Amino acid sequence: MVLGIDPFVVLAVVLATAGFFGSFVPFVPGAVLSLAGVYTYWFSTGYTDPGAVVLALLTVVGVAVLAGSAGTVFLVEYHRSGDGGESLRTAGYTTLGILATTVMQALFTFGMLVALVAVIVV
C-alpha cells in the first residue's frame, strides 16, 4: 500500500480510464484496456470483488455485442448469397467496424469504468 491506497486499485482505475479515453483514439483498444482494469482490480481483491456475476456480465456484454452483430450479418448475408465464405468475411468486416466505432467503444468503456468505480466504492 502506498499512502493507504493499493497500487493495483490505482492501476485498475487508470486502465479503465485509459480504456474510456482510448476509445476516442483510432486503433487504441479501449475495450481491452477497460477489461484489463476490471481484471486487475479482481486480481487485487484476491479474485473476490467484483463477484463472479458482475465479472461475467462485464466480460459477456462486450463479447455478446460483437457476436450478436457478427452472427446476424452472417445469417443475413448467407441467406442472401448462399456463400458461407463471403458471409463470414462480411461478418468479420462488420465486427471490425463495430470495434472501430468511436461511439460504441466510448459507451462500452464508460460503462465499464462506472461499473468498476461502483464496485470499488460500494
Image: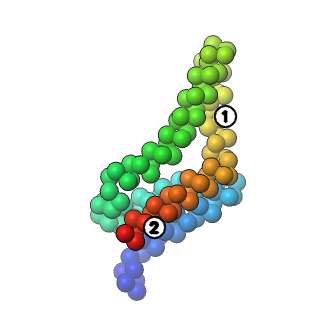
Q: Which quadrant of the rendered structure holds the C terminus?
A: bottom left
Q: Position of residue 3 (x, y in %)?
A: 40, 86
Side (left or right) of 6 relative to 67: left
Where is 67 relative to 6, above or below? Answer: above
Q: Position of residue 58 (x, y in %)?
A: 44, 51
Q: Position of residue 41 (x, y in %)?
A: 40, 64
Residue at coordinates 68% horizontally, 52% vertically from top-left? 102
Quadrant of the rendered structure where residue 91 is? top right
Q: Position of residue 6 (x, y in %)?
A: 38, 76
Chosen colour scheme: rainbow
Residue at coordinates 52% horizontally, 57% vertically from top-left? 111
Residue at coordinates 59% horizontally, 54% vertically from top-left? 107
Where is 68 relative to 48, above or below? Answer: above
Give the numbered dot on residue 115.
none
| Residue at numbered disc 2 | 117
Residue at coordinates 51% horizontally, 46% vertically from top-left? 62
Mark 1 vs mark 2, foreground winner is 2
List the single residue furthest toward the bottom.
3
> Label 1: how many residues lie within 10 Å, few (<14), some (14-19) or many (20+)?
some
List the single residue furthest toward the right.
26
> Label 2: how many residues lie within 10 Å, few (<14), some (14-19) or many (20+)?
some
| Residue at numbered disc 1 | 93
User: Which amino acid lies under the numbered mark 2 shown in the image of this protein?
Assistant: Val
Side (left or right) of 39 relative to 87: left
Q: Of marks 1 and 2, which one's residue comes earlier in the chain?
A: 1
Q: Secondary structure at mark 1?
A: helix
User: Which amino acid lies under the numbered mark 1 shown in the image of this protein?
Assistant: Tyr
